[in-house]
Amino acid sequence: MIARETFSKRIGRGLAVLAVIAAGLALRRFGYEIGLPFTMVKYGGSILWGSMVFLLVGMLTGSARIALVASGAMAIALAVELSRLYHTPELDAFRLTTAGKLLLGRVFSLWNILAYATGIAGAAVVEASLLNRARGSVA
């Protein structure tokens, strides 16, 4: 039963990752066209990126402990942001590509760390509420 629950949770997180990626790409592509302000497009994408990292960590580890998943996601987010302080020609060339911009970004920013933390916390709260609702419907 536990293995089935873990598998179902991983599938759910995987589907959520795809939805978050789609939302992030849509925000980046259409955000300005629909009149969203710069801060919403810029930091909305960072919030979604933090949520995606939370979901990926949870999916890959299969952990049910939300605090552990959130801690791991925050460690990854910090490592990625701090990596922006390190420069090599190859890494800088990758950062200029679309994939590099989306995955690693280009410029270190404390605001990005705050946005990632917001996304991770938001994803953790949503997951906790979904788990509580599922437990309530079983009882």
Image: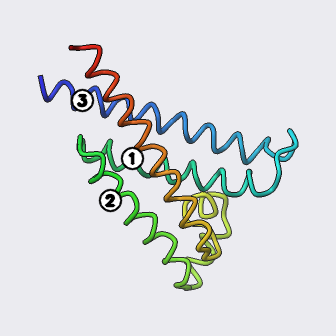
Task: For marks 3 and 2, give the CA distance.
Answer: 20 Å
Q: CA distance from mark 1 to mark 3?
A: 14 Å
- Given residues 15 and 96, the one toward you in this image is 15
- Residue 93: x %, y % from top left: 63, 75
Q: Secondary structure at mark 1?
A: helix
**What amino acid is at disc 2?**
Gly
Q: Which residue is mark 2?
A: 72
Q: Residue at x 63, y 44 (%)?
A: 24
Q: Earlier in the sequence, mark 2 or mark 1?
A: 1
> What's the residue type where badge 1 is placed?
Leu
Query: Circle 3 sits in a helix, a strand or a loop, which is it?
Result: helix
Kindly identify which numbered label has been placed on residue 56: 1
Query: At 55% from the left edge and 66% from the top edge, which residue is drawn?
Result: 104
Reading the image, the residue beneath label 3 is 7
Which x, y percent locates residue 68? 27, 54
From the viewer's perspective, is 122 left or right of 48? Answer: left
Position of the N terminus, as image quadrant, is top left
Q: 70 or 60, which is in the foreground?
A: 70
- Percent across and percent down for residue 100 are 60, 64
N-terminal label among 3 and 2: 3
Per the rendering, the mark at residue 32 is: none
Q: Quadrant of residue 7?
A: top left
Of circles 2 and 1, the one toward us is 2
Q: SS of the residue at dot 2? A: helix
Q: Nearer the viewer, residue 133 or 58?
A: 133
